[in-house]
């Protein structure tokens, strides 16, 4: 049998006693594109971080060309010819392509000065060999993202990388740029480079990859050869058989005869194009789609963060002008953002201060904040949402992820919004809190609010939604009543664009 | 973030145009200022070779500090302590000469004063991870206090004529010594920034610190070096003050940080790091000097000059920011 260029054997890793990888095996052959797949939290990125020296495995071996190696830092990974192709973030935008590729490895003239001409010549040769149509003297920030990636790849190759890791390489690329990248990957393959390809996009994986390894819940599930397997098998392996009772969907009744409480007409903003959406009072609408499909951008533009170029928004039949988040809040919208630590909370402030921030004007007595009233409101929410904190004066950063997310929820519920939008409401939250948050969202819907949820976790989306809208390339591609969706696989198909 | 980046398409022609315009604005502005003063102050002798050389003399200290500041700002940091360092080093240099250590002793005293403060700044920024704005705001005050304290605010006269010649008041033929200092260090700084690995790594650190680190740039070392650089050059600038004024004095360099930063930003170096130009800095510095000189000839006092300098720095950054946003 052919010796694999890379083998990872029985890799285990735990964080704070919680295992994230259990006995994982992974091997890559020379000149193959090998997909690494799995749902959120399956352990893909942890495995790759172990390979690139960001983390160290608790147990297990890494073998390159059959020889065991120890990788404790990114430099050591590079020495073992492994390179991670970061997306746009690993280049210096203000330097040229050649300067970036040979940064810290420039040839010097006899005077000890940089020989830029030499770098440019070598870069030109490299780019020509790879068939990349940019000039070595182009400043990186003036190039499209697709070219950033190729510059990054060229840089890795100039450092003798043999194994390239690409994490969702197409998420910020246009269709054309993706095609260019794929033909580029095929060229690399023909030259004998190995590529580890991480993506959620099945169509791309079947197009470009030779084999697929699937992880689920930190365990190795299987390795399939692309030409001998099919979408069904792969999706089944990713989803698994377990079914979480807590996430069971219950059909809920809501009023379909009244006019919609929230309506979006022909909305266009940035990548998001021509969105039409109606939500009944008490209805929960889920938005599904791949990374970069425009889900988050849609919520951001509805909330006045990204400028709306075109289209109309109606709440209770009233046309709304939303130019900034203040307008949106006044109109009755609330957005629970994706990154609660960055966008949702003032971590250094107390539970209470966070909760009353959006409603300061409502808890004022004269000029001053009414302490009794604001304490009562905060205590009330702590009780209602079952937030685990010693008292309402505890700093938000000291609480667990799930409880932090509940504070963010409380913060916006206090303002009693008409339309509640949530972006990945349970990301990084433990399973117990997850169920509770799902329950809170359901209760909110019961009070007649319109609810719009974005989530990458399909079980959660299926548990919550009365209707699911699938987005693709900034547009709504499909709308499905929850009743009509039989299985998670069916939704997965829709998301993949089949 | 992602959506923003993906909007940039390859032929970014309009953005490029704005970018270049920003790079050259300082030259147009400088010529404009020169023409304006030449006409409005033609009777007061602005455009005489004597006055122009005077501008060069008065600007030398600012120029030297601005050269080093270009490196600091290119890494995305700032150094507010340069003026205070100049004051202290003028005194240490003068005291060393007074104590009989001679020109070399004065030079070593002044320069090492600057290096020590630069080292403290650099270590606090890199090892203790305090933002450079705060670190140098602190050392600006502390070093100034130290300068006032060592001689109880008394000036220290320098009677060594050779020192005064070399470090300030001398002319070689028609050429002021201070012009030579400026030229020599401009060339060195330009080569250092454009042609050496160090300069490239300075720009890389400021352009994207994480990426630079992943490419093998020792970003902390680079930052430490640039603060040593401003320390060194501010120390030297202190000696030039001492040489020109024949004394060390705690009030030298007061408010220079404003002029120095204005010169660098005006020259086209990005306050956000990653883009730096030495030639721009020197022109920016000469422009600040010319404005100072012109305003004095016009009869404006120090307070009015400060107002104008403050406005200039804000305008320069505002223009820079606009170009950054694109």
Image: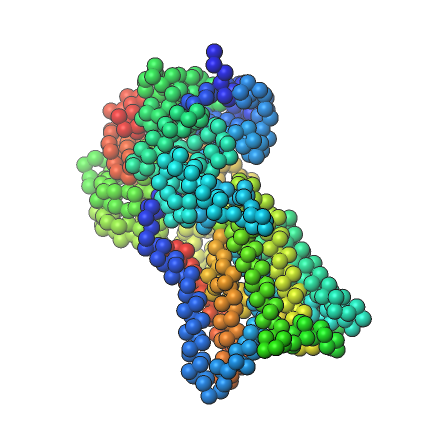
Identify the residue at horizontal 59%, vertical 50% (top origin): A111
**Quadrant including the C terminus of chain A:** top left
Judged from this view, the residue extending furthest toward the top is A1
Judged from this view, the residue extending furthest toward the right is B100
Q: Is residue A410 left or right of residue B174?
A: left
Residue B50 spot, x, y in % from top left: 55, 81
Question: In front here: B199 or A348?
Answer: B199
Question: Can residue B285 be seen here?
Answer: yes
Numbered disc total: 0
Question: Can residue B141 be seen here?
Answer: no
Residue B65 spot, x, y in % from top left: 59, 65
Identify the residue at horizontal 75%, vertical 78% (top origin): B159
Residue B139 spot, x, y in % from top left: 65, 61
Judged from this view, the residue extending furthest toward the bottom is B43
Identify the residue at horizontal 39%, vertical 55% (top origin): B325
Q: Is residue A420 left or right of residue B231?
A: left
Question: In front here: A480 or A375?
Answer: A480
Coloration of the structure image: rainbow
In this view, B206 is above or below A186? below
Q: Residue A482 sits in which quadrant?
A: top left
Identify the residue at horizontal 34%, vertical 30% (top origin): A183
Question: In front here: A59 or B171?
Answer: B171
Residue A402 spot, x, y in % from top left: 47, 35
């Amino acid at each position: 049998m052919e010796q694999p260029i890379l083998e990872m054997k029985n890799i285990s890793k735990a964080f704070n006693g919680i295992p994230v990888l259990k006995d994982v095996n992974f091997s890559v052959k020379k000149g193959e594109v090998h997909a690494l797949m799995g749902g959120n939290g399956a352990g893909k990125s942890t495995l790759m971080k172990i390979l690139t020296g960001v983390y160290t495995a608790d147990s297990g071996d890494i073998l390159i060309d059959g020889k065991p190696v120890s990788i404790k830092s990114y430099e050591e990974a590079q020495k073992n010819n492994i390179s991670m192709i970061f997306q746009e973030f690993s280049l210096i935008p203000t330097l040229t392509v050649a300067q970036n590729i040979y940064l810290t490895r420039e040839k010097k003239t006899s005077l000890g000065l940089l020989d830029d001409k030499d770098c440019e010549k070598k870069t030109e040769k490299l780019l020509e060999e790879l068939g990349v149509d940019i000039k070595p003297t182009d400043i990186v920030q003036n190039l499209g993202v697709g070219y950033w990636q190729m510059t990054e790849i060229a840089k890795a190759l100039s450092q003798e990388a043999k194994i390239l890791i690409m994490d969702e390489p197409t998420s910020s690329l246009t269709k054309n740029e993706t095609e260019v990248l794929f033909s580029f990957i095929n060229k690399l393959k023909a030259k004998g480079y190995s590529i580890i390809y991480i993506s959620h996009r099945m169509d791309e994986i079947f197009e470009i990859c030779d084999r697929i390894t699937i992880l689920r819940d930190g365990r190795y599930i299987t390795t399939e050869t692309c030409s001998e397997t099919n979408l069904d098998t792969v999706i089944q392996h990713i989803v698994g058989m377990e079914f979480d009772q807590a996430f069971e969907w219950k059909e809920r009744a809501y009023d379909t005869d009244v006019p919609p409480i929230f309506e979006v007409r022909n909305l266009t903003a940035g990548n998001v194009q021509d969105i039409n959406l109606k939500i009944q009072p008490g209805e929960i609408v889920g938005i599904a789609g791949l990374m970069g499909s425009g889900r988050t951008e849609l919520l951001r533009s509805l909330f006045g963060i990204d400028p709306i170029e075109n289209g109309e928004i109606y709440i209770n039949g009233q046309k709304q002008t939303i130019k900034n988040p203040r307008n949106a809040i006044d109109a009755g919208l609330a957005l629970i953002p994706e990154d609660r630590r960055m966008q949702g909370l003032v971590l250094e402030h107390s539970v209470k201060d966070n909760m009353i921030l959006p409603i300061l004007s409502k808890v004022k007595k004269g000029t001053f904040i009414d302490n009794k009233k604001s304490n009562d409101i905060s205590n009330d929410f702590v009780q209602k949402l079952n937030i685990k904190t010693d008292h309402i004066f505890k700093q938000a950063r000291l609480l667990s992820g799930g409880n932090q997310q509940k504070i963010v929820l409380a913060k916006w519920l206090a303002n009693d919004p008409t339309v509640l939008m949530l972006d990945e409401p349970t990301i990084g939250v433990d399973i117990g809190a997850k169920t509770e948050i799902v329950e809170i969202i359901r209760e909110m819907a019961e009070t007649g609010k319109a609810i719009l949820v974005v989530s990458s976790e399909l079980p959660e989306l299926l548990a919550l939604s009365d209707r699911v809208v699938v987005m693709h390339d900034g547009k709504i591609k499909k709308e499905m009543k929850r009743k009509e969706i039989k299985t998670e696989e069916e939704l997965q198909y829709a998301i993949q664009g089949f | 973030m992602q959506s923003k980046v993906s909007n940039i398409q390859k032929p970014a022609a309009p953005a490029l145009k704005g970018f270049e315009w920003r790079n050259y604005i300082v030259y147009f502005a400088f010529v404009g200022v020169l023409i304006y003063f030449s006409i409005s102050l033609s009777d007061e002798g602005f455009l005489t070779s004597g006055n122009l050389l005077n501008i060069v003399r008065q600007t030398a200290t600012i120029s030297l500090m601005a050269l080093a500041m270009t490196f600091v700002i290119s890494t995305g940091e700032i150094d507010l302590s340069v003026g205070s360092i100049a004051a202290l080093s003028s005194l240490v240099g003068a005291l060393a000469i007074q104590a009989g250590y001679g020109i070399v002793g004065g030079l070593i005293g002044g320069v090492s004063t600057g290096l020590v403060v630069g080292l403290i700044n650099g270590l606090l920024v890199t090892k203790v991870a305090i933002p450079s704005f705060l670190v140098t705001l602190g050392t600006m005050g502390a070093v100034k206090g130290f300068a006032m304290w060592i001689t109880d605010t008394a000036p220290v006269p320098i009677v060594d004529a050779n020192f005064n010649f070399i470090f300030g008041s001398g002319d070689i033929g028609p050429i002021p010594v201070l012009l030579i200092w400026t030229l020599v260090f401009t060339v060195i700084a330009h080569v250092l920034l454009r042609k050496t690995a160090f300069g490239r790594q300075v720009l890389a650190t400021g352009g994207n610190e994480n990426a630079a680190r992943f490419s093998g740039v020792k970003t902390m070392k680079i930052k430490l070096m640039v603060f040593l650089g401003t320390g060194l050059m501010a120390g030297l600038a202190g000696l030039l003050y001492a040489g020109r004024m024949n004394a060390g004095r705690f009030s030298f360099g007061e408010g220079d940080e404003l002029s120095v930063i204005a010169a660098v930003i005006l020259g086209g170096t990005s306050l956000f790091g990653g883009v730096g130009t030495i030639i721009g800095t020197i022109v920016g510095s000469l422009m600040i000097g010319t404005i100072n000189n012109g305003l004095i000839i016009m009869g404006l006092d120090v307070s009015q000059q400060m107002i104008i300098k403050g406005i200039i720095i804000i305008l320069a950054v505002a223009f820079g920011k606009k170009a950054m946003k694109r």
